[in-house]
Amino acid sequence: MNRTAEILEEKWDLPLGFTMALGENPDAMFVFSSMPKKYRESCIDRARNANSRSEMQRIVSDIAQKSFNDFIG
């Protein structure tokens, strides 16, 4: 089951578990929404391939540990 999120006038087809995990982690949500498109797509692909809730939470935790500076340069 997927949800569609509209952010910055773009639509992302996000896995439900990923959406829920982002909702539980405001830092990750902020970083994710600030990422350039190619990095967001990479995160979404990782989330689609997650095989468990703990793996999904690890993906979101990894996102939260990034900063916008990690994506520019």
Image (tube, grey):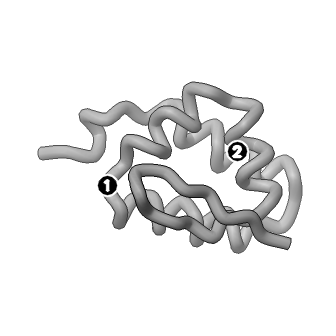
Which sits in the foreground, 53 or 34? 34
User: Looking at the image, is mark 1 or mark 2 nearer the viewer?
Assistant: 1
> Could you tell me residue 40's position as x and y percent?
45, 59
Q: Residue at x 29, y 40 (%)?
A: 70
> Could you tell me residue 5's position as x and y percent?
61, 57
Q: Is residue 58 left or right of residue 7?
A: right
Q: Secondary structure at mark 2?
A: helix
- Per the rendering, the mark at residue 36 is 1
Residue 18, above or below 31: below
> Could you tell me residue 64's position as x and y percent?
54, 33
- Image quarter for residue 27? top right
Which sits in the foreground, 66 or 37? 37
Three-letter residue code for mark 1: Pro
Residue 57, above or below 51: above
Residue 12, above or below 53: below
- Per the rendering, the mark at residue 58 is 2
Q: Residues within 10 Å of mark 1 (few under 14, many from 20)?
A: few
> Could you tell me residue 61's position as x and y percent?
64, 37
| Spatial separation of the CA atoms under disc 1 and disc 2 | 21 Å
Three-letter residue code for mark 2: Arg
- Image quarter for residue 45? bottom right
Q: Quadrant of the C terminus?
A: top left
Q: Does label 1 or label 2 sit earlier along the sequence?
A: 1
Q: Residues within 10 Å of mark 2 (few under 14, many from 20)?
A: some
Q: Is residue 52 left or right of residue 48?
A: right
Q: Quadrant of the N terminus?
A: bottom right
